Amino acid sequence: MEYPKVHLVGKRPDYTLIKGWLEHCTQHHFNCQPHQSTDLERISVVDVWRRVIVPLPSNGKYLALSYVWGSVHQPACSTGESLPSQLPKTIEDSITVVRALGQSYL
């Protein structure tokens, strides 16, 4: 698989292309291989299908989001709690992307 030198970004993400990149990484890059870590046992993730905070399952893959929350106070959620009905657009968009990529955890 070759990556395009220039990829024009359209109005909608090309999820097929992104899935291909993820698959290529997990198959060909050692550092992208799934591995067991006891450090991950305490991680809580968003189950994007049920919209609930859950402990990361032992065999669970997750996609990470990195961004700055800003100065606005955001409500906190604990494990087992449902997400608030209104989330920042960044989080909602991330949930949409994780679902579109066929994954379950953010």
Image: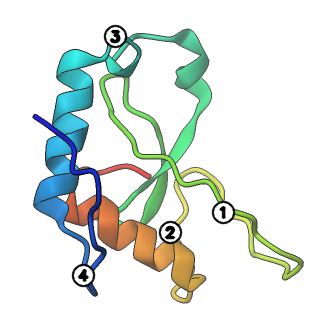
Q: Residue at left 66%, top 63%?
A: 77
User: At x 26% / y 28%, what residue is drawn?
Assistant: 25
Residue 102 visible in the shown view: no
Q: Nearer the viewer, mark 2 or mark 4?
A: 4
Q: For numbered disc 4, what is the local secondary structure?
A: loop
The answer to which of marks 2 and 3 sits earlier in the sequence is 3
Secondary structure at numbered mark 3? helix
Residue 13 drawn at (x, y percent): 25, 72
- In primary-sequence order, the first of circles 4 and 3 is 4
How many neighbours does mark 3 have within 10 angstroms: few (below 14), some (14-19), or many (20 or more)?
Answer: few
Task: Tell me the quarter of the picture where residue 93 sits.
Answer: bottom left
Q: Is residue 104 left or right of residue 31?
A: left
Asked if marks 1 and 3 touch (Cβ < 8 Å), the reply is no
Q: Considering depth in this image, is 20 or 56 the residue closer to the camera?
A: 20
Left or right side of 101 for 96: right
Name the side, left or right, on which 54 lies relative to 79: left
Q: In the image, which disc is placed on residue 17?
A: none
Front of the two marks 1 and 4: 4
Which kind of residue does numbered mark 2 sit on? Ser
Q: Which residue is mark 3?
A: 30
Residue 62, located in which quarter of the rendered image? top left
Residue under label 4, please give it. Answer: 12
| Horizontal and vertical percent position of residue 89 | 53, 84
Residue 1 appears in view: yes
- The residue at which mark 1 appears reads as 77
1 or 3: tag closer to the N-terminus: 3
Residue visible at 30% across and 24% down in the picture: 59
Q: Say what amino acid the circle numbered 3 marks.
A: Phe
If you read the primary sequence from the N terminus, does the residue marked by circle 2 or circle 4 appear first?
4
